[in-house]
Every structure is written in C-alpha cells, then in structure tokens.
Amino acid sequence: LTHVIWTEVPPISQIKWAQDAGKGVILIPNAHELRNSHRKCCEQADAVLCTSRHAADLLTARWELDNCAPLCWDPGVPILEKDGPANPDAPRILYPLELVSPADQPSILFMLDSMLDAHPATVTIPYLPSRLASATRKFLDNLQKRRPKQVTLRKRIDISDWPVLFTGHDLTLWPSSCDHAGLGPLLSVYGGTPVLAFQSPPCNEFLGAGNAMLVPCKHKMSPLGVPAARLDYRRFGEYFNAVLTTPGALLELYGGTNGLLRERREQFTGTWKRLLEC
C-alpha cells in the first residue's frame, strides 16, 4: 500500500496520519460538496483530483492550490460503436431512475407518461425501491399497469449489468442537476448509446455533437462557485420530443466522438500513472 485515496474530505488529522506513515494522500472530492473549511485538507493532500475540468480550474484559482488537477473519469468498459437505433420508429429509451437524485425523479416520469401517449417508444426504468417516495413508487406501478407493452421496470440492477443495459437501448435520459463524475452518461456513451442531458459540467465535457443532445439551462452555484443545472423540465421535454419526432434526429446522435472517448481514456490512465509514480 503506497497511497490512500479518499472520495470525500477526511479530517486533516487522518491525512497527516497517513502521510506520517509514508503514504501518499489523494483526494477525489465531490466539488459540489466542498466548503471553505475543506481548504486546509486539500492543501495538505499530495493531490486533489476533480472530476470536471471546470472544478479543477476553479479550485486552483480560488484556493491557489498547486496540487489540483482534473481527472477525466473512465468507467473501464469497452468503447463500442453502434450505427444507430435498432428501430428508429420505436426507439428503446433508458431512464436510470436508480442513479438519479430522488428530487429529480417525479417530473420526468410525468413527462415520459405524456410522451408515450403520442409515440410508440418503449422505456426501461431501473430503480431502487428504497430511493423512491411512496407516491413515486405508486406512480411507477400504475404506469406499468397502464402501459405493459411500453414500460419495463427493473429493480436493483447489479453493477456488472449496467454496461449491457446501457448498450441495449437507443437513448439514455439523464435529467440530473449535477453529477460528481458523470458515471451514468459515461457508461452510456462508452456503450454506444447517446444521451439527453442538461448542459452542465462534468457532462458537457464529454457529451456533445455525435453522442448527445444537451439541453441549455441556467445554473445555480455552490458556495465555491461550482455550477449545477437549474432543472427546466419543460425544455427537457421539448428536446426529448424533438428527438423522438424529428426524422433522423436520433440517428444524428450516433457515432461522432469515439476518438474523444479514447483520448479521455488515455488521459485517465496517464493521470494515475503520474500520480502513483511520484
């Protein structure tokens, strides 16, 4: 054991204890949760990795850190390429409710319900019962009963099954206000499936023309100035409807950024190699 890695900021006494024992300390904090009280801990660490370039630049400038760098997160799955949706007239939609904040869930479910009235798409909704309010759980059960041929509910997806699940669909919905590492959208685009998401970091650093449609949005700021999307579900629904109803719109989201993903993977590997060799 040469290094200790924390994904949340520990007490500074623990950082010093690890360093006194001859271990390198690497912090990978959620930038949206950082506070000014964490500054000394970040200064003490050997390296602070941020999962968005925006957050890394912000902390470097705001706290004058010389040990802060972006970590281009890589999910470690094969980079796949698909030619387009299996059935453009009835695309398979994935809404990974399990991975989305509970506060972001209900409005999109209502939007999905209305969209399915007008379009023959099918939707798979993975979810954790423990993360749902009772009203949301009842709405889900009712949604499947009313639309048994269009809606599939999946409980408690094993982590090893997520890559196959993303690859097996034609579009992933990711209406999240903020994202620590963008793991869900990353798994989707690495699996060849485009994403519909809000235009906010870190997602806008690896989603774009050729693998996603980004919904413009206003932002709210954390105490340190890290942006999170102000959720505009009406606009999200408009973009989703455009993808479903405009001829060729979904097909245009395929196959444009595999080179970017491979470059991202090389950056991720290079970052860790440099850190662990120091």
Image (spheres, rainbow, N blue to C red):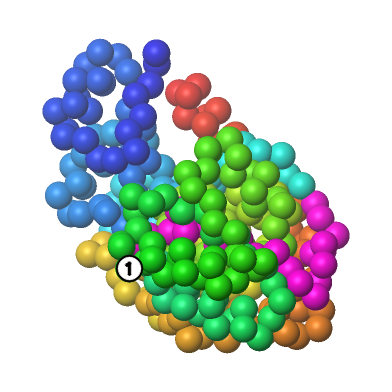
Q: In this view, does 154 lie to the left or right of 225?
A: right
| Residue 149 lies in quadrant | bottom right
Q: Is residue 212 left or right of residue 134?
A: right
Q: Is residue 49 above or below residue 237?
A: above
Which of the two residues, 162 or 223, is positioned nearer the viewer here?
Answer: 162
Question: Of helix, strand and loop, which mostly describes the magenta segment?
Answer: loop
Q: Which residue is drawn at 62% across and 83% down?
A: 117
Characterize the local packing of mark 1: few (<14), some (14-19) or many (20 or more) Cα atoms within 10 angstroms: few
Where residue 259 appears, as percent x and y from the top left, is 75, 52
Which of the two residues, 108 or 174, is positioned nearer the viewer here?
Answer: 108
Q: Is residue 195 left or right of residue 23?
A: right
Q: Residue at x 72, y 84 (%)?
A: 245
Total numbered badges shown on the rendered structure: 1
Amino acid type, mark 1: Ala
Which of the two residues, 168 or 221, is positioned nearer the viewer here?
Answer: 168
Is residue 98 found inside the magenta-colored segment of the image?
yes
Q: In this rendering, does residue 247 appear at all?
A: yes
Quarter holding the N terminus? Answer: top left
Is residue 41 found inside the magenta-colored segment of the image?
no
- Give the magenta part as a residue range: 81-102
Where residue 23 appears, as percent x and y from the top left, is 32, 18
Which of the two residues, 78 or 26, is positioned nearer the viewer here?
Answer: 78
Where residue 148 appears, as percent x and y from the top left, is 61, 66
Quarter holding the C terminus? Answer: top left
Q: Residue at x 21, y 47 (%)?
A: 39
Q: What element carries label 1?
A: helix
Q: Which residue is drawn at 76% across and 72% down?
A: 90
Q: In this rendering, does residue 182 appear at all?
A: no
Q: Mark 1 points at which residue?
A: 135
